[in-house]
Image: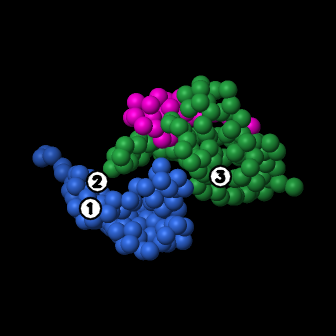
Amino acid sequence: MKDLKIDWFADNVLDAVQATVDEVSEEGAEKIAEEARSVLMAKAKYPSGNLADEIEVKISRFKGGGYIVQAQGPGNYTRYYASFVELGSIHNPEPVPYMRQGLKKNRTKIQNEFKNRLVARLRRER
Amino acid sequence: MKLLKQGIYTKFVGSALAGAVTNRLYYARAPQGSSFPYIIYNIVSTSDDWDFTSSFMEFEVQFSIFSSTDLSVETVATALRTLYDHCTLTVTGWTFLYMQPNFAAENNSVGDDPPTFGRTISYEVLIEKART
């Protein structure tokens, strides 16, 4: 008797998982960015909106790095005070942690979204 | 929250960290003309929660170290982490649960003349008390 082989189309499952991970990663990063903009406008000492406009979601340059949220990121800004607002500085010692708050408020929601969306997607792949 | 600030300051008094900054730990802002190195701390976020029996308060406490040299900042940062990482604070009227580091970053102003060097270290603090 020849070997019995069963193809369960693992590639399809892996593709589905990857697509879902990418989708949720991007949406999660957008949520973090949105929250960061919102905290900034509510709490910054001088909320002009310039810095809020420079919070953006980018694809990481690293393999498997997913999406990142950056404020006044490299190559796309002429100002450089994002970290001084986030962390405070010697001239402006009161920090406004808009990026950290953006992450903190969304971390659990995004993790749950990964779980829910992956389960739903894998059910469809059966 | 006043009681938390008291707990942080009580821990600081007489410590190696206090020696490293010659007692210059300030809340929110340093007095004009303060000598380096010094530390400013802020309570950057507060949230509360409860269950059937207890109330909880969670804080994010950020310490910002400033000095004229990176080496000095590093020395103070090491002393700060030795004192506060996973320490126990006395917060009167509350049961202290934890103080754990959650973020650290360099915060230099090298464009200043002379340049200043900084380090940000923040902690999550959780306290609890029985609901009445």
Q: Give the residue at mark 1.
A: A59
The magenta-colored residue range is B65-90
Cα–Cα span, label 3 and label 1:
33 Å
Q: Is residue B17 visible?
A: no
Q: Is residue B114 visible?
A: yes
Q: Residue at x 42, y 61 (%)?
A: A114
Chain letter, disc 3 residue: B
Q: Is residue B15 above or below residue A124?
A: above
Q: Is residue B69 above or below residue A126?
A: above
Q: Amino acid at mark 2?
A: Gly
CB atoms of marks 2 and 1 within 8 Å: yes
x and y, in percent, of residue B11 in the image: 68, 33
Chain letter, disc 1 residue: A
Q: Is residue A34 above or below residue B58?
A: below
Q: Is residue A122 left or right of residue A15?
A: right
The hue in which chain B appears in the rendered picture of the protein: green
Label 1 sits on a secondary structure element that is strand
Q: Amino acid at mark 3?
A: Glu
The hue in which chain A appears in the rendered picture of the protein: blue
Chain letter, disc 2 residue: A
Q: Give the residue at mark 2.
A: A65
Q: Nearer the viewer, residue A75 or B94?
A: A75
Check if mark 3 and mark 1 are on a common chain: no
Q: Residue at x 74, y 56 (%)?
A: B51
Q: Is residue B34 left or right of residue A81?
A: right
Q: Give the residue at mark 3.
A: B58
